[in-house]
Image (cartoon, grey):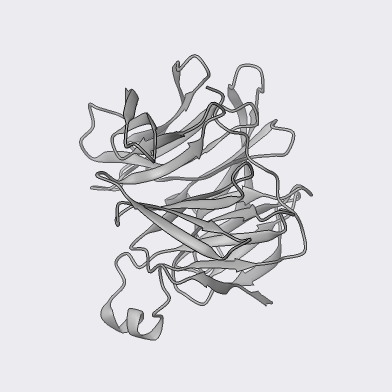
Amino acid sequence: MLQAELIVDCQNIHGEGIFWDALQGLIWWTDIEGRQIWSFNPSTNESKSYSMTDRVCCFAPRRTGGLIVAFANRISFYDLLTGVEEKICDFEPGNSETRTNDGRTDRQGRFVVGGMNEKSGEATSSVIQIDKSLAVKTLLSKVSCANSTCFSADGKTMFFADTPDREIVAFDYDTQTGAVSNRRVHASFSDEPGLPDGSCVDAEGGVWNAEWEGRRVVRIAPNGSIDQIIHVPVWKPTCCAFGGPDMDTLYITTSRLMSDEETLRNEPHSGGLFAVKPGVCGVIDTPFCA
């Protein structure tokens, strides 16, 4: 079993939403509860953090520069250097219990963002999609905790998890319209030590998933079986993304959220950024299309 190694001892409260920006040569991620955005340059081993005035749950680079950001209660364009924000839409303004959570661009550059009910845990949230014209479409409803959103290399399959269901599902994804159909279970986590959290794909059709409270990241083969396990030496892996100049390094965010003092004494690197080379390469995400 391979083991992930600590790369940045950032001690995020809740690291999440990681992706590789090929244009800048940087890994980006968010500390949701720490209200910070982080970057890491694997060529120089330099990391940097940016303080935010609100929680950032996930984000992506834009084709035209800057970021598209899912703040807890809205999705906006955001310039990290100037702090200028341009709101696109509110997220579920009629529901005070939900916030955004996991999200990623599809292969055409649409931004797909799912939410979670952080108060009751009930299935009252949704997954939305924002396209080039900034039109907002609801893809899924009755969601309690959206996670694992990622897309096959050809863009024709969307993977997704409503975390409490303990399974990753797959949908047919219409690359022209962005519509989802033909829901089916791709992998069951009923016998896994952790819950399915954030995911990414590799170039060979595998889905890599960070297991919340499972101390591991697993690769789900195209047939739905788990065929590779990466040990993470902290309790709460949260999300993963391939990056680096050759796209051969798997970066893993972790969390300190709701961990007691004894756990943090035993695992002082909780909330750090970890990495491993698992022997396959990833697929670069498409920047947001506007």
Which residue is more in the foreground, 18 or 26? 26
Quadrant placement of the N terminus: bottom right
Tell which of 181 and 78 is nearer to you. Answer: 78
- Looking at the image, which residue is at 33% across and 23% down? 89
Residue 189 visible (yes or no): no
Say which quarter of the image contains residue 270: bottom left
Query: As displayed, is residue 17 above or below residue 261?
Result: above
Q: Decide if residue 40 is on the left or right side of residue 93.
A: right
Task: Tell whether 207 sits left or right of 60.
Answer: right
Q: Nearer the viewer, residue 206 or 184?
A: 206
User: Is the residue 81 above or below the residue 74 in the image?
Assistant: below
Q: Where is residue 256 in the image (x, y as percent from the top left)?
A: 35, 68
Kindly identify the residue that appears in the image at 60 percent across and 72 percent down.
4
From the top left corner, tell me how far across and down residue 266 is, in percent. 38, 85
- Taking 135 as reference, is 3 left or right? right
Foreground residue, 271 or 176? 271
Q: In this view, does 265 lie above or below 116?
A: below
The residue drawn where x is 59% and y is 28% is 109
